[in-house]
Amino acid sequence: MLGLEKKDFNLLLIVAALVVLAPVLLNPFPEGSAMAQFNAGYPDLMQRFVIFGIFAIGFNILFGLTGYLSFGHAAFLGVGSYAGMWMLKLLSINVIPAIIFSMLIAGLVSLAIGYISLRRSGIYFSILTLAFAQMAFSLAASVLTPITGGETGLQTNLNDPRILPGFLGGGSSADGNIPKPSLFGIEMTATYEISVGNWLWTLNWGYAICAVVMLIAFYISIRIFRSPFGLMLRAIKSNQHRLSYTGLNTRPYMLACFVISGMYAGLAGGLMAAMDPQVGAERMQWTASGEVVLMTILGGVGTLIGPVLGAGLIKYFENIFSKINKATLEMWFSFAPDWLEGILVSIVYPFIGKGWHLTLGLMFMAVIIFLPGGLVEGGKRIGDWVRGKRGKAANDGAEVKTPAE
Amino acid sequence: MSKLNITRRGALKAGAAAGGALALPTYLRADGHAGFTNAPGDSSVTLGFNVPQTGPYADEGADELRAFELAVEHLNGEGDGGMLSTFSSKALDGAGILGRKVEYVTGDTQTKPDAARASARSMIEKDGAIMVSGGSSSGVAVAVQALCQEAGIIFMAGLTHSNDTTGKDKKANGFRHFFNSYMSGAALAPILANNYGTDRKAYHLTADYNWGYTTEEAVRTSTEAMGWETVAAVKTPLAQTDFSSYVAPVLNSGADVLVLNHYGGNMVNSLTSAVQFGLRAAEANGKNFEIIVPLYSRLMAKGAGENVKGIFGSTNWHWSLPDAGSMAFTRSFGTKYGFPPSQAAHTCYVQTLLYADAVTRAGSFNPCAVAEALEDFEFDGLGNGKTLYRGEDHQCFKDVLVVKGKENPDNEFDLLEIVEVTPAAQVTYDASIFGGELGTCNPGA
């Protein structure tokens, strides 16, 4: 279906189901309960999940297929964000031009950076991309302040021109409120809440749009993985020299792959600007580039769904664990006698709040050591284990009747 | 024999049952059915305190958080009541806000606009905060203020000193109690002329973001007006920790005054560098070399230690002020934490009280009603004397303190000496000089 094999189509369906049900799945705890702290089903975080999912899917097309480790992908995310933001300021508050232009501009920038960086491979390629990204960050934070707003960042303003006609989201006003990014009049922040018993589920337009874009991005990524082009990229990963000795010029394939990956990052950046109209230079810092590498490795390099899972996990830690403070801990451990409570709090405290990096680091180490294939390998092992058990049970009964398929 | 056997009919039945069960108690409701975002319930109201817990302003953030906790305590009628007794408006009675118990959530701005917005958004969307306050950087204040304007909740700025917050980037839902760069410049200039003369040559080191720019501009304009000359103005990255490469060229530049437009950890590091390079002992153009820090705080003085002695600057508030409000606040803060509050703590405490008072006087949590109650509100007894919340730009106008590092401190907290209290009239400016549009108040959905 849709030009996909059955297995891939099922995977697409699973991802679609996860994305559609996310508002429910991410709010497993009733409102007002002590565990509500761990609910993640609010618009900002759900948008972040899918946006960083797109970012990681794009990164995985480069890293997973060709093995070229780019340490500068945040630069494309940032360029996309700035481009999207300027479209919201100059053209119209409609998100569509912003998203399209963010991809185009990020594509152009990645073409330039890729053209130079891809002359080298391995560690030299990584260092080159890192250098370019840091350069982009420094430029955005200081020299290019008129375009990027420097460390203060870029926002929409009341008196932005927005030259497109009103029905396309143009127009500016000196008073009233700054228009919110919208899709033909539907604001990205428009939200409906459904409450079922004590549970509260939030349906948000911005999330819906990000989710649709993400599913399209995921579909395209599957098609790339299964295409002859994807096969060629895998060949580059396994042995680039041998490929060149057969008379093939690998450079165009690599450059195309790099640009596609950069456009995915630009798309993610444009969506970020469209969901929350504020862009800061720190979005391009090398730590942000490192983050997407972590996401991909944590989820599973070269797998289709892995990067999305990794992105979700990291963003969950960043936004949920970092918000647990000492008072919350004291509430959890209030059942214990005072001396024990003190000890428990001081043991757990370094791992929450601003110490969330530490928890994430430990988890990352555990995954790398025990599950080198990332979360996807973990899922596969559990799947095998369950199937093994069931298979055994079925074999036991094989004497009396044929096992079910 | 645990074989899972799903038939088509079974699946259909289960699906129908589940769907029915879900649909039964379901109702749709638009966000903010009370006419504004995050309308609180009958028993409690949630405030969001978004402060830097990491990064160059982490010290200020920690102190702000202490002040917020104290303010919440006092609003809920616990503790000794602090400034509630000295505040000129008597609307607050220690029974929460409009009879609702005050609760709060905290977040880390990391002194990065992006992170601050993410944190504020989760407070608004997840925790249902009705007001966001705090922050120790103007970049963050401008970003979060814009977010609050969009979301339709009130933003009570914490420590933010840039002109932009209530100038170029002012918003109808945002309010600032803290003073700004313009006021610092206007208050400092006459003192500098008296002490250092009118023919000085100044060298500026400026933190590279909007607060740095407006502070540099304010100090330049006001000192150049009295005859000083500006030799050079160099921008330094906010994340910089080693300033030696920036300080080294100063002595040979022909300047005889160094102006450090730095705050928090930045200022501690740059001042220490400057002293290590022997700038304070040096002579240039036949005069003693001098250093000026336009925005001063006790936490910075503490961090820089010996180096601050005799250095001029301005500050919003100092714990040693003798008025009843300052004394009451310093006493209750000191009793709870064991040391006196900083100016960041003071402004955050006052902002929380002012918000609670405005809600009580308006009789509603609706941001538009609250904004109306705050606009052109005159009050006293919160530590700065008579103060006006100007309606045109949502900026407070009050006396400005010019301070200098104390030569012989009596104790480890007594680091700043008040040189002069510049009256509010002398630092008041026309609201239109910085441009920007206030827009109209936004109550959200």
Image (cartoon, helix red, strand yellow):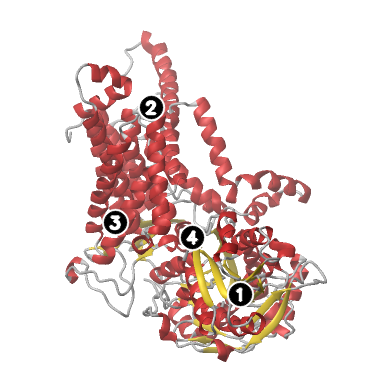
- Element marked by disc 2: loop
Crowd class of label 3 (few under 14; some 14 to 19; many from 20; radius 10 Å)? many
Numbered tag placed on residue B4 in the rendering: 2
Crowd class of label 1 (few under 14; some 14 to 19; many from 20; radius 10 Å)? many
Image side of residue A273 versus residue A2, left or right: right
Q: Which badge, 1 or 4, comes first in the chain's sequence?
A: 4
Q: Chain of mark 2?
A: B
Q: Amino acid at mark 1?
A: Thr
Residue beneath label 3, please? A83
Viewport quadrant of the C terminus of chain A:
top left
User: Do the numbered discs 1 and 2 sit on residues whose CB atoms are within 8 Å?
Assistant: no
Mark 4 vs mark 3, foreground winner is 3
- Element marked by disc 3: helix
User: Do the numbered discs 1 and 3 sit on residues whose CB atoms are within 8 Å?
Assistant: no
Q: Residue furthest right?
A: B410
Image side of residue B432 versus residue B421, left or right: left
Q: Chain of mark 1?
A: B
Mark 1 vs mark 2, foreground winner is 1
Residue B343 percent across, percent down from the top left? 65, 73
Q: Quadrant of residue B369?
A: bottom left
